[in-house]
Image (spheres, helix red, strand yellow):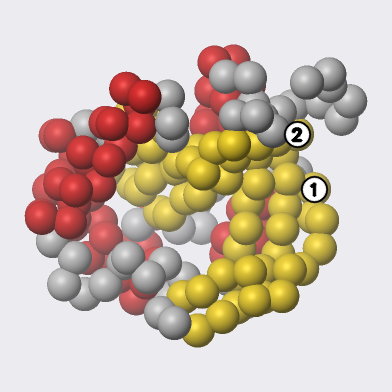
Amino acid sequence: MRLRIRPVEEVDLDQMVDALQESVDEVGAWMSWAHKNYGEAEGQVFIDYARDGWQRDSHYEFAIVGDGLFLGVVGINQIKWADRVANMGYWVRSSATGKGVAPRAVELAMAHAWDHTILNRLEIVAAVENTRSRRVAEKVDAVFEGVQQHRLCVRGIPHDAAMYALLRVRHHIC
């Protein structure tokens, strides 16, 4: 499968909602916004948010696409420009998991960050129990930095989180 990422667009709405509905049990276990009633209205809000982020250079949400099918989203968000650090988040539709889609999408988004921004650090924060997300971080050679207690809150329940970092270079002048 030829995989690519590109900014999330209006044309993604139907396939994005379908992908989420297919994957709501797996994705929803770790992301509170993913729920069984997620539909076009919430999808449109996300697309508008994504478009605004690109226009303002405040965050970058990419559609993951393979063979014409919407496979998920990888995003660079929660950017702190002064510190040149951001969060890297991702989700992939259930039928595409275990095929290397998420690691490749993370690599492509990371390349975008290094080529088009001044960011030096991308953080992947995954609940300790979210073994699939942690495995993606490990496959892209993110540096495991430890566990932060009660770092994430999912559906009102605090979770300890594993912190991983992707670094442009180990020693870089800000």
Is label 1 in contact with label 2 (beta carbons under 8 Å)? Answer: yes
Residue 50 in the image: above or below residue 157 = above
Residue drawn at x 80%, y 48% is 143
Name the amino acid, label 1.
Val
Q: Is residue 90 visible?
A: yes
Q: Is 109 situated left or right of 119 in this image?
A: left
Q: Which residue lies under the disc numbered 2?
A: 167
Task: Where is residue 73? Give x, y as percent.
Answer: 38, 45
Task: Find the residue positioned furthest to the right.
Answer: 171
Q: Is 59 situated left or right of 16 in this image?
A: right
Where, by quadrant of the figure, is residue 145 drawn? bottom right
Q: Is 130 situated left or right of 31 in this image?
A: right
Mark 2: few/some/many CA within 10 Å (<14, 14-19, 20+): some
Residue drawn at x 44%, y 43% is 74
Quadrant where the C terminus sits is top right
Residue 74: mark in rendering? none
Describe the element under mark 2 as helix, strand or loop. Answer: strand
Task: Find the residue positioned furthest to the front.
Answer: 82
Which one is in front, 84 or 66?
84
Which one is in front, 49 or 111?
49
Residue drawn at x 19%, y 48% is 45
Quadrant where the N terminus sits is top left
Residue 24 in the image: above or below residue 133 = below
Task: Where is residue 151? Give x, y as percent.
Answer: 63, 69
Q: Which residue lies under the disc numbered 1?
A: 143
